[in-house]
Amino acid sequence: MPDQDGRFTFEPIGVFHGARKHRYETPRQGVLAPDATGVIALLPQRNFEQALRDLEHFERIWVLSVFHLNPHWKPLVSVPRHREDKVGVFATRAPYRPNPIGLSCVRLDGIDGLELRVSEADLLDGSPVLDIKPYLPYADSFPDAHTSWVLDALSDLYTIEEAHSAVAQLDWVRDASDINLRGFIDVQLQHEPASRRRKRIALLSPQSGTSPALYALSYRTWRIVYTIDEDARRVTVHGLASGYTAAELEAGAEDRYGDKDVHRAFLSRFSAASFQQP
């Protein structure tokens, strides 16, 4: 029921737990991130056990959640691709909404008590969950519907591969600094991996003979080094590099972001003062 001013108050029924914690890791759509898994933990002592009855037989569910990291809304937003100008927020799935409510269609992988295991989830860790509904293909799917400025999201995807050296370095940075660069890599490089529009991409070396061009994508003080195979529509991440110069990492140098010890340890661990063409 609304209050005397006509406003409604909603209480979460649970919370989503997953590996992706930061806004830059959010998949554009859950279906584009099959490895984006997590658990919806419903609140105890609310009789939700009965509310879940028969839900396990559905392959997908709708999850209404709260964009808890977006305190403000914007009437116009920039879209990730297709358009150079801004679009009205109601014509997008952007999180900058008057009421910060998210709608996600996720795969239901199983139910254990009050925990729902899900995948293909474009949700961030800690997202409050407001409601759960079953996905019904006959009522919820309209594949021939016009989608205005949005093109086929699957038509221009690049696959992301990690070289052996990159696996070790990405794991190390994740464990040492709680920065999961893989989510950022997926979001930034699945589409137009050489485009500098709203991306901090540098060309380290141009294509030469059979050697592909080498690029670096910046995330804060880290550089993600990669190549692109256009024929295979594949991006290969070869490794990481520090965005600091040797002089900036000298003892006593200003540490504006408080992360230079991590960079020093990274360079010592991987002996990677600079990245070479693979």
Image: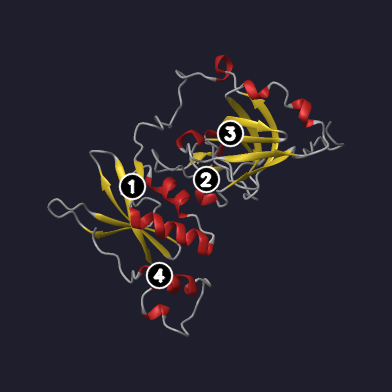
- Mark closest to the chain's N terminus, 1 or 2: 2
Q: For the residues marked 1 and 4, what is the alpha-carbon distance in whole angstroms? A: 28 Å
Instruction: Point out residue 122 in the picture as x, y percentages from the top left corner.
Output: 54, 39
Horizontal side, residue 1 vs residue 117: left or right: right
Callout 4 secondary element: helix
Q: For the residues marked 4 and 3, what is the alpha-carbon distance in whole angstroms? A: 40 Å
Instruction: Point out residue 17 in the picture as x, y percentages from the top left corner.
Output: 63, 45
Callout 1 secondary element: loop
- Mark closest to the chain's N terminus, 4 or 3: 3
Residue farthest along the top direction in this orientation: 138
Q: For the residues marked 2 and 3, what is the alpha-carbon distance in whole angstroms? A: 12 Å
Tell me which amino acid carries mark 2: Thr
Q: How crowded is mark 2: few (under 14 residues within 10 Å), some or many (20 or more)?
A: many
Which mark is on residue 26? Answer: 2
In the image, is residue 213 above or below residue 42? below
- Mark closest to the chain's N terminus, 4 or 2: 2
Q: Do labels 1 and 3 touch, CB within 8 Å?
A: no
Which mark is on residue 193? Answer: 1
